Image (cartoon, coloured by chain):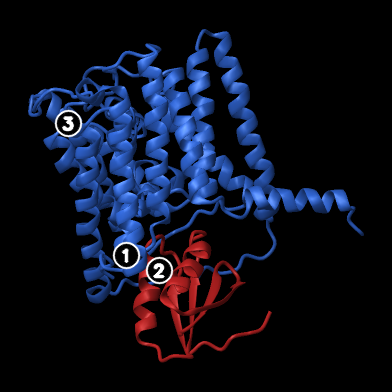
Chain colours: A red, B blue
Amino acid sequence: MAEYTPDEVLDARGLSCPMPVLKTKKAMKNLKPGQILEIQGTDPGTRNDLPAFTQRSGDEFLGEEQKDGYISFYVKKG
Amino acid sequence: MAESVLVERFKQGYSAVFERNWPFWVGGVLLAFLGVLAFASGRPWGVAGGLRVWGDWFFYAVGLYDKAPGHSLFLSEPGMLTWALLFGAFGSALLSRQFSIQMAPNWELLKGLVGGILLGVGSVMAGGCNVGGFYSALAAGSVSGFAMMIGLLIGALIGLKYLMWEMENITAKPLKAKEAKEGGVDWKKIQPWLGALVFLVLIVWAYALSFQAYTEIGVLMLIGAGIGLVIQRVRFCFVRAFRDPFMTGEAVATRAVALSVMISFVGFMIIKWSGLRPEMTYVYHHWIGGLLGGVVFGVGMLLTGGCGSGSVWRAGEGQVKLIIAVIMFALSNSLFKYYVFTNKVAQAWGQPFFLPHATGYFWAIVLVCLVMVVWWAAMAWNEETDKFTMV
């Protein structure tokens, strides 16, 4: 799986629904189109929530990567 | 070692059922059927009642209450339903390798604590939680279910406004990263086996109960565990149904809950109309209590990230914030109910009202379906236009 170089990193580890999506929404506002946000999370629900959210917001969900003890999600601002 | 096609197929099948989440609407349909089955077997599904039983027994054990609680901790219907929900969700999380003791930052834990108290107090005011006060109450034909539904919407809006404010003004200290442990047990591999064991124990237990004339409790336990499994596999969330249209615009959960209520209502009405269960059972008088309690409960749900059922299944998954919320919910529900009961605060504000008494069974079904469809349609419209979306 390709390594993405994020422009910003959002640490959402330990946060449960709805905080990861809420914080992602806020973080995305500060990005310029084309920039990549990495969201680090531990809540199993985030794996469904983020792709669904990005589909609605017009951003691109690039993928997820299992890391040690958490998952990294990559989203590109549309 | 080359794995046979059969093993590969089995793994794919297992992964489809126990790893990827089931669709929301499937959860709605299954919950409706299980809820109707529970009602036919003994009593409608509920969560707060069982939590109150836990709270009652705790306060009795530490000496705060003089009399032993009326409901048995394990063998009463409400108590059993909530235990079964917890263990069904726990087993399901294990089978899906999703169990994990998940700590949260202190600020989140505090929200779990405060939210749990609001859930406990709100559910006493409303005569039940999102299940007993809204979902099952409405299914049973109690018009008070609509009162709580409105309260939940208002409470969810208030709670969401708070979360939006919090995001701008409070920066919580993040969790310290967990250090990777060397060696030790690979829990991920063992979890499914533990999950299977949990369900095996539940089935054997239900069977054993039938030998001691507790067959009905055993059946309720299996239904409750089934509800726990379905809820965890779907990650079904009543909070989403109320909150998401205003937060992300999505109406997926709203549709599922609306559909579930419609199916439940028809099922319950069949049971009541046929005389299998008396008409006024589980019909409440909680008008003002339903509305105000719904608001309080709604705010609590947004703070904790779970409702009655939601907090319990997430606790079963190992989320510490929700474990705290469940404990506070149980304790505060017990205490507040005790206060209300001994001080005779909540005399009936009005009588219980069974909808078919005013409209007949047929038009009651039409009316409830109409309300659910209007909710569905309004949120679906918002999904396209984002007119209500606040975030």
Asked if labels 3 and 2 share a chain, the reply is no
A34 or B315: which is nearer to us? A34
Task: Give yes or no for contact between labels 1 and 2 (Cβ–Cβ under 8 Å).
Answer: yes
Q: Quadrant of residue B109?
A: bottom left
Vertical position of residue A22 compared to residue B99: above or below:
below
Vertical position of residue A1 compared to residue B251: above or below:
below
Q: Answer with left or right where residue B349 lies relative to residue B317.
A: left
Q: Is residue B304 visible?
A: no
Q: Position of residue B287 (x, y in %)?
A: 14, 34
Q: Position of residue B45 (x, y in %)?
A: 40, 30
Q: Answer with left or right where residue B208 lies relative to residue B131.
A: right
Q: Nearer the viewer, mark 1 or mark 2?
A: 1
The C terminus of chain B lies in quadrant? bottom left
Chain identifier of the residue bearing label 2 in the image = A
Q: Secondary structure at mark 2?
A: helix
Which residue position holds label 2? A21
B186 or A52: which is nearer to us? A52
Disc on res. B247? 1
Q: Quadrant of residue B108?
A: bottom left
Q: Secondary structure at mark 3?
A: loop
Q: Nearer the viewer, mark 3 or mark 2?
A: 3
